Image (cartoon, helix red, strand yellow):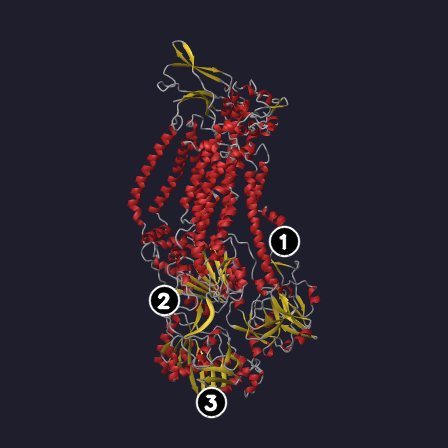
Amino acid sequence: SNVFMYYGLSNFYQNHRRYVKSRDDSQLNGDNSSLLNPSKECEPYRTNEDKPIAPCGAIANSMFNDTLELYRIDNDTRTPITLIKKGIAWWTDKNVKFRNPTGDGNNLTALFQGTTKPVNWPKPVYMLDSEPDNNGFINEDFIVWMRTAALPTFRKLYRLIERKNNFQPTLQAGKYSLDIAYNYPVHSFDGRKRMILSTISWMGGKNPFLGIAYITVGSICFFLGVVLLFIHHKYGNRNTSADIPN
Amino acid sequence: MERCAARRAPEEERRVRANAREYNEKFQYASNCIKTSKYNIVTFLPVNLFEQFQEVANTYFLFLLILQLIPQISSLSWFTTIVPLVLVLTITAVKDATDDYFRHKSDNQVNNRQSQVLIGGVLRQEQWMNVRVGDIIKLENNQFVAQADLLLLSSSEPHGLCYIETAELDGETNMKVRQAIPVTAELGDTSQLARFDGEVICEPPNNKLDKFGGTLYWKENKYALSNQNMLLRGCVLRNTEWCFGLVIFAGPDTKLMQNSGRTKFKRTSIDRLMNTLVLWIFGFLVCMGVILAIGNAIWEHEVGVCFQIYLPWDEGVHSAFFSGFLSFWSYIIILNTVVPISLYVSVEVIRLGHSYFINWDKKMYCAKRRTPAEARTTTLNEELGQVEYIFSDKTGTLTQNIMVFSKCSVNGHSYGERQMPEPGDVQDVLGHKAELGERPEPVDFSFNPLADPRFQFWDPSLLEAVKLGDLHVHEFFRLLSLCHTVMSEEKSEGELLYKAQSPDEGALVTAARNFGFVFRSRTPKTITVHELGQAITYQLLAILDFNNIRKRMSVIVRSPEGKIRLYCKGADTILLERLHPINQDLSSITTDHLNEYAGEGLRTLVLAYKDLEESYYKDWSERLHRAGSAPEAREDHLARLYDEVEHDMMLLGATAIEDKLQQGVPETIAILTLANIKIWVLTGDKQETAVNIGYSCKMLTDDMTEVFVVTGHTVLEVREELRKAREKMMDASRSVCNGFSYQEKLSSKLTSVLEAIAGEYALVINGHSLAHALEADMEVEFLETACACKAVICCRVTPLQKAQVVELVKKYKKAVTLAIGDGANDVSMIKTAHIGVGISGQEGIQAVLASDYSFSQFKFLQRLLLVHGRWSYLRMCKFLCYFFYKNFAFTMVHFWFGFFCGFSAQTVYDQYFITLYNIVYTSLPVLAMGVFDQDVPEQRSMEYPKLYEPGQLNLLFNKREFFICIAQGIYTSILMFFIPYGVFADATRDDGAQLADYQSFAVTVATSLVIVVSVQIGLDTGFWTAINHFFIWGSLAAYFAILFTMHSDGLFRMFPNQFRFVGNAQNTLAQPTVWLTIALTAVVCIVPVVAFRFLKLDLKPELSDTVRYTQLVRKKQKTQHRCMRHAGRAGSRRSGYAFSHQEGFGELIMSGKNMRLSSLALSSFAPRPSTSWIDTLRKKKGCEGSSAGSPSGAADKTLRV
């Protein structure tokens, strides 16, 4: 089946209260007035040089921007693995929650007129991708980043590797190399980056916790059941009307 | 109660001028107008809001609201607090408004009651509230002196006499006589009264019921006034057609109101515990806030500083310390749900529900009087399940105050046996229709045209004996028709009306009347009796009157044949000693009968006669006349002469009068005693009567080891008597636990020794002894002694003493007390006790008005306590346990999450979930449980009174239980957070995307929380009704419905910034992993609870568990009702004799003062030379009454005071 490529970050507090609220969903939903006048929640990433930031807020500003490339090394030749960048976000996010601003024409540059890029970003939001249905606010890397993690150590889906044909595994055994364009500093706060490749089942990716927990709880329940049965047999007959006083 | 009139300085003395409103208005005396309502339409909103924000809880939430408006602190949107707050304020306001509406209504009703007031010489119907001090009002027979304390001016009876019944006021059942002072007694008609302009100067309002001192100034004369001239509010006019009175004290100044004590706001012990716990929780909240704030400061210092490249500090925050400070307040906001505002409202709602259950209870509805039970206070229900002491009034509460001629023994033959249930409403103790069986017909008295149709007798053999001409029976009834002080009145031919001083005498004379010996009329010298249709007039030679020492009364009559005979009736102890020796055989048979009657709690009298020689009588009456006019020691001389003649009498038989108990009283008392509730009877009535009732309602039994009677008059005597009682009890217990354990006990406190007393004791204490016993240095001694006894009876106590006794028990015993009574004299104790119960459906309503609960029969008390009270307590405890549990489980998740989100006060849940959790998702199921739950059905809780004990011991909700709930809540919260944490750390969705995003996490935790608390309420619910099902399933459904709505596209499109969770529900809840997590969490949270309960049921079952279990087992078996033993055992005790008054009216009758002129004219009557009976009466009362209170020494000469 398909192989999924994730990037992981540790010690990154995407669940911090001030971080979580630092966004303007109205702006991200393509509301033109919010585009030019973002919510106060975005402070201090609300405006830059008197221009409203699009997308505003700390979440967007801190978007992960390393690029990862995977190569298969076959007799010293590097064949790049096709990494699909679409289909990694929730359908509702891509189609309902995130929308580009509307206006005359489809020229994103014109639509984002009057806004400025987030401080940390190298380029504005309308230049995230070349394809128009993956650009601006509906860029899927951006959408995935904006769905904040619940815990300080998290992983986010980066790319899909599609299975070519049914007779070969998606990634054959062999040597691979990972090229990372390092743009995203994590050293200052003692963060860690990871890259994870995983396949999935009906339960999602590999997740030993649930299995172990179920087996443990199941055995405890069984044991408890036996003990209680024993106790009930031995002492349960106390429960008779003879005990009722007066 | 507020007064319309403004407050004024305490009065020194009161001046009232009759018929002079302008003059009296100068003094601004309290009027009769009552105002208990608080608001009107305009003031409602501001005043009510102001009052509500005086509640600490509401102010606290207002404070939270303000905190939330500060952006740096706000961790939650403002609406999470304001929605519940507004909801709470609205519900409370609506409740207050309804209450006030009803107060307005009842005020109007009371104020608009009618009374007849003499204004400008004409009698006018006036509204109650317009009756002023100084008005003259007219009262009619059987009317309550309801408005005010009156000075009696004149009455329909000769000499301004007036009979009143004071049962409402002091609990005494006998009738009393009041007399107008002679000058005003002549003012018979309205025109004379309108001209009356006397001025009364008297004492200021006080609470002494038996004292009044004042002077009437009229026409330049002074007349002393005493209590003899007063008609107090709360009395009932009897046997007097009408009377006029001058209003002296009105409204709150009346002696009755002055005696009723202050109304205190009553709180239940659960309330107090709840307040303490809320404070503790608040402290806990602050602790958590501090821990998290320190965590925040450390985190910001260690990590946050470095993380500033992605998340800079807020403007104005320059140090980790300040950040920690802000985070403290943020955490206070999000953790505030541990002190939920909805708690108080939910508690009120539950109590209201329980109150309605009481109001709607058909088994507490008295069909005869058409009165349902009523919970007048809605805040005390659960305390009904914790009562340990019941203080009961006697007259009207335990007894019906009806005397019935029930049995008699004539010449060694006992008549009157019958076994059949009461007519009237026929529901027995367990609330089932009593099996009536064969219902015997009452004896048919139709042969006798003069018979009283209300009289019923069930043994036809007595009537047969009369008809057959049994001489003994004839003589027996002849005695009953002659030997009494009853007055008769014949309005029309054959329609006789007896005016008896005590109801016992009335019953005896009525019995004789129905058996054909009709007492028709009397003059001072004659008694006319219709003996089996034949009018015979006896000459009345002397009345040897009753008093408390003699315990007997006799008459000496001359029959038309000229024979002189003495008829005597009296207490058996006295009379049996005075019989002629030839009566020995008969006497022993009669004694057997007497014992039998006494064992049934009947009041007995022995009847005897003696023939006197003409010559002997002449000599005796000569001496009597001399003794009567002797200046000194008149009483002693008379007593000696009486003693002499009442000797060597011939026994006729004995009568037994039933002081009719209210239905089901002995059974109720027995069941309540089994429930470990101690019952004390506090009555204003005589000791004999009270003890007698104690026996007949099985509070006192012959099985008791000893009944201590304390009647000492001085402090020393009382102390000695109490000490002796205690010593006796200790001796007994010493002999039981011989030797070593006794030593141990001696060293511990006296109380504990007395608590371990073996054997049953009872204590009877008199009012004057009680006064000493209640003094500060003796009260503990008294209480210890009394509490060691199984039954306590206090007789001749004043209303205030009743309250003092209750107060004493409240103070030292820390137990829940309940006072029950029907009359105005019980008001103070009803108000003092934790719970006051009024008997409704009677004439007076004072007690009901002051009470918290009211119903019409004493027997309903067991249902109120054992069923409603027990359930209320159980429900309230279960409710509180669950409520604290669910809020801790809910809130503590934030605490654990704090450790993973940099202590930033990020909530785990969506803000809408936080808003709605307490008011929608979890409120109704727990309310349903709090309102409807029951552990065992009602029949069982009556069947096994022991089930009541957990409430008394406060086992179901106390600090320990609270900590268990809290611990369970915290345990749940840990699992609720860490299981999803463990799962989410590495999980991905089945489409490869991340699972561990914040919003999915929030939905997972919230869903598992809702499911776990719903399962938990399912486990806690012991009694499933459709409503429980509906609420529990409904809440779950509502949760999912609201969840999907809140996460829907439509709402997001309208308010993108408010509904950020768009699409979350369908995305998250479609994941199998999420459901596996929820299932795991639920199982791990619930299994320990189930296992623990299972173990407890097996190893240490509660009584209720056992009862429930056995009920399951024998569900198909026919239920057997435990029959109460109707003890018919003969008692060794000698009777309380059937006189409920202190001294008789004999002298009054012989003087003829109370006879109407018409009846006097009929007789050949020569008045005796001025035996001023009033003087004597005054002398007897003098020491306590008039003379002490009289302000001016120079009293009028016509009254020798």
- Taking depth in this image into account, of B1093 and A74 the one nearest to the observer is A74
Q: Are marks 2 and 3 on the same chain?
A: yes
Q: CA distance from mark 2 to mark 1?
A: 58 Å
| Amino acid type for the residue under numbered disc 3 | Pro
Q: Seen in the image, is B211 located left or right of residue B477?
A: right
Residue B567 in the image: state x and y as whole percent.
44, 82
Q: Which residue is mark 2?
A: B1127
Q: Tell me which label, 2 or 1, sits earlier in the chain.
A: 1
Which mark lies nearer to you, 1 or 3?
1
| Amino acid type for the residue under numbered disc 1 | Asn
Residue A68 in the image: state x and y as whole percent.
46, 17
Pointer 1 local density, CA inside 10 Å: few below 14, some 14–19, many at least 20: few
Question: Residue B40 — which label?
Answer: 1
Picture quadrant of residue B145: bottom right
Residue B177 in the image: state x and y as whole percent.
56, 74
Q: Are marks 2 and 1 on the same chain?
A: yes
Q: Tell me which label, 1 or 3, sits earlier in the chain.
A: 1
Question: Residue B237 — which label?
Answer: none
Q: CA distance from mark 1 to mark 3?
A: 76 Å
Q: Residue at x 37, y 57 (%)?
A: B943
Pointer 3 local density, CA inside 10 Å: few below 14, some 14–19, many at least 20: few
Q: Which residue is mark 3?
A: B560
Outermost residue toward the front?
A105
- Taking depth in this image into account, of B598 and B617 the one nearest to the observer is B598
Q: Are marks 2 and 1 in contact (CB under 8 Å)?
A: no
Q: Tell me which label, 2 or 3, sits earlier in the chain.
A: 3
Question: Label 1 lies in what chain?
Answer: B
